Amino acid sequence: MTRINVNVDGISYTDEVEPRTLLVHYLREQLGKIGTVVGCDTSNCGACTVALDGQSVKSCTLLAVQADGGDITTVEGLAAEDGTLHPVQQAFHDHHALQCGFCTPGMMMAVRDLLQDNPDPSEAEIREGIEGNLCRCTGYQNIVRAVQAAAANLSSTGGQS
Amino acid sequence: MTAVADPPAETTAEIGKSRLRKEDQHLITGRTTWTDNMSLPGMVHLAILRSPMAHATITSIDTSEAKKRPGVIAVFTGQDFAETQGNVPCAWPVTPDMVNPGAPSLAVTQVNHVGEAVAVIAARDKVSAQDALEAIDVEYEPLPAVLDMEAAIADGSPLVHPNTTSNRSYTWAFESGAAGTGAPIDDAIASPEVTVTRRFIQQRLIPAFMEPRSTVVQPIGEGVTVWSATQIPHILRTMLALTLGIPEQKVRVIAPDVGGGFGGKIPVTPEEIITTLVARRLGKPAKYTESRSESLMSAHHGRDQIQDVTITAKRDGTVTGLDVHLFADMGAYLRLVGPGVPLLGAFMFPAIYKFPAYRFVCEGIFTTKTPTDAYRGAGRPEATFGIERIMDELAVELGRDPMELRRQNWITHEEFPFTTVCGLTYDSGNYEAATAKALELIGWDELRREQAERRERKDPVQLGLGISTFTEMCGLAPSRVLGSLDYVAGGWENASVRVLATGKVEVVVGTSPHGQGHETAFSQIVADKLGVAFDDVEVIHGDTQSSVKGMDSYGSRSLVVGGIAIVQATDKVVAKARRVAAHLLEANEDDLDFEAGSFTVRGVPGGSAGSSMSMGEIAFATFTAHNLPDGMEPSLDSDATFDPENFSFPHGTHLCAVEVDTETGASLIRSYVAVDDVGNVINPMIVEGQVHGGLAQGIAQALYEEAVYDAEGNLVTGGFVDYLVPAAPDLPEFTTDRTVTAATSNPLGVKGVGEAGTIAATPAVINAVVDALRPLGVTDIRMPATPERVWRAIREGTTGGDRAASGTIAYGGARTGTTAGGGAA
């Protein structure tokens, strides 16, 4: 077992983990952060995407020990403390960018990262930017609309929250 | 005094409004209840050992080492449950002589497909269970894989199941002359002026819902509570009771948040039965969650048909007959509705056209592959593909414009209701209107001109235009029709409406959503019917203890059948409320108008004291029961079970323009227009979303997805690396629009929308790809039309790829008979 220290959604944790434990399993099973989900076992679907030190990562592709000392944001930490939705969350709701909602946590975390890197993406850049996240319900069209709306909102409010 | 607020001052109709979804809040904040999120005190975690062989006898299993592994609580094999596990249920014996060899949840003596469950380990955590799998020692005696459907029913084929005499499960036939619904097909095909015969291949697909299946079972006394990622909590409850001999009233099934289904969560699964068996044997809660690779190889697949289609016509283009023969791959076992899936297509091959004569024969065949069952559209996408492809081929044969040929033969809007050659009565539709709108939206004539120019100048990038003028039968299903098709259950749906003391409303439904937005759409219906606020309606579903009766969600039935049950239940509430209102207003019931949630005495000036009562006031008066009509029970609550008299028939015209690079074989959808007529619409935003998602799956069948087996029966596309669920860059921006021809078969005028996009899209895309390549001598393309297949088709004048079952190992139909694992990796 290896000791790690992480901060997840604003809470500090110190835990013993097996070196082979994937970050997503640590989040779900040891921390109870069940908002982040597992959709595949080949790093294709992106449902498990979280932010590690501000960058989106597929938490099934990272060992928990690799996150030692890191600051992690999951979907559960996306909204403000007062419950105000993050612009990406709000846009997903406003534009019907989710149906079953299983891919949504990872998709939103990927979108958040995409908009950090490119605050005003074209439709093609959005589609390329979320290529690592699969959605089986929406056909992506409303996700693209939501990303455009979130981008507009973020730029009008002065950047990433 | 009442405890309720006044009704909203503004009383605009909720139906037809793009209400944002009630479902979203918990999904976008990660406060979800996926089954795998569940943890119960004392819960054991299961891992399943799966067969690496397509077909083999189990000669021995040694679990002794696995049982010694740390954290392992128990290991069970099929032998341990041989007397108790029964068979995974099949509810659709489509013919009296259908052969169902049985389907053990855990294999006992033989495995019949790769991925079949062979043993299960219960451990204190999931990792311990998975680690111990390698310590189970199974000896297999290999049997020959049975992969090709036609070879499987040829003389001398090895049998999949030793307790059968043939790999043919059933032959189901319909003929319009014999049925009395049309002319004899033999007359039509005996002396046609024009005949076109084609063989189309419906490749094997995988539903690939995003949430892997998961089941938690808690034994409680004699009974169990089951949480499962299922579309069918009610059917699962009944089937678990029947399969395992647990009294039905002791079985509670809960479908919490369910992450997509698309038919893939319709059957009762071996894993649900195994988890129940283990939990009961150990007396502990147990959880099983599949990995994606397990899901792809052991959750059921869809499609997989060989379609031999013959169409006959007069030289002037009038169609005279349609003769369809299907081979339908059941895989290794018959799942819940697997045998019936291709037969749903029996009624859809004639589609929107006025065929005088029709025959449909389907042979269901066992192979040593993953069982098949419903996948979005279930039988109807296959039929729509067959008819829309052959109409294009007939047009070519006759030298006619494919749309003009369709127009000549389709049912015109004046001809509804129209009884088709297979005996279905289409209540309403307007194919002309949808088509006119679609042609205009895509700029058809301009595209045709561009196509001609590109052909003229031999542009390496050719343009193809594809048409799909489709209909579907939705709203499964009239119980009497299901009975005539030998399905063992009905097709009704139940809803109950409870009016609370504060005037808030609970609606308990028997449908079971997994992404469709029922809570939102149903709230809109109830808000309008009772005149209460949208936010005052709570929709309750997915738990058989609260939603006692239901037939669940599939076949675009939730609104068309379940929504009508809601309407009928609200009508009963209003009738009861009217009685209370009449009593309290001292008026005759017949003199009360009910509008926007208030009863008003007709003829009395509005606003005058004692002239009207709101639903909230009536609810509170009923709750107190201080002054109700003599003999009336103090409740407005009402329940309704609706059994439709007919299916609904959404239709539409989908048009697709594809650019095909003849040098690389790459197909790029340049524009896709979908004009759907789904009748009246409750929530346009949700309808559009359903169409988008449906299109994605229909396009995916045309261009991307295929479950491929190698010559030994191994699923080569066993991960999302190889099974190509499209990502955002793989799909175009869709142009969607609607025409509205209200259904006349239900009081909402709705038709259903869940499957429309998937049913329509596949032939539109393939017709476009073939249209682009026709000048190059290509007359068909095997799906998915990958760049390799298209490239090969252009150069070889073929369809670009042989059938996967004959030993194809890679995308693009590399036609080799050898086996290799790396072809698609």
Image: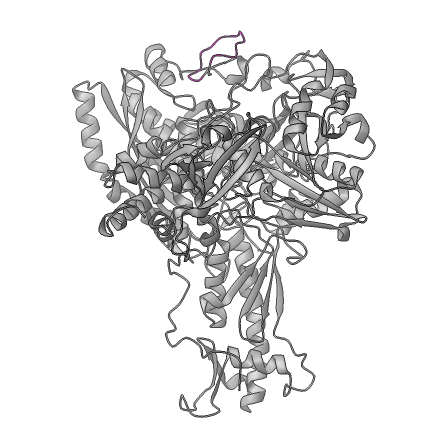
User: Relative to A40, does residue B753 appear above or below in the rendering?
Assistant: below
Give the colour scheme shown: one colour
Q: Which residue is outermost to the right? A: B83
Left or right, B171 with respect to B401, comes to right
| Residue in front for this viewpoint, B100 or B711 | B711
Left or right, B825 with respect to B674, comes to right
Residue B723, given in percent of the width and then of the height, sits at 47, 25
Q: How many marks?
A: 0
Q: Is B821 a magenta residue? A: yes
Q: Report whether residue B657 is seen.
A: yes
Q: Quadrant of residue B683?
A: bottom left
| Residue in front for this viewpoint, B12 or B825 | B825
Name the residue at 40% across, 35% down: A52
Left or right, B11 with respect to B373, comes to left
Residue B25, given in percent of the width and then of the height, sits at 45, 54
Name the residue at 22% across, 51% down: A156
Q: Is B822 a magenta residue? A: yes
Magenta residues, start to end: B811-823
User: Relative to B251, does residue A47 appear above or below in the rendering?
Assistant: above
How would you classify the magenta stretch by its main secondary structure?
loop
Residue B37, given in percent of the width and then of the height, sits at 58, 43
| Residue in front for this viewpoint, B8 or A60 | A60
Residue B35, given in percent of the width and then of the height, sits at 60, 43
| Residue in front for this viewpoint, B818 or B442 | B818
Q: Report whether residue B437 is seen.
A: no
Q: Quadrant of residue B608?
A: bottom left
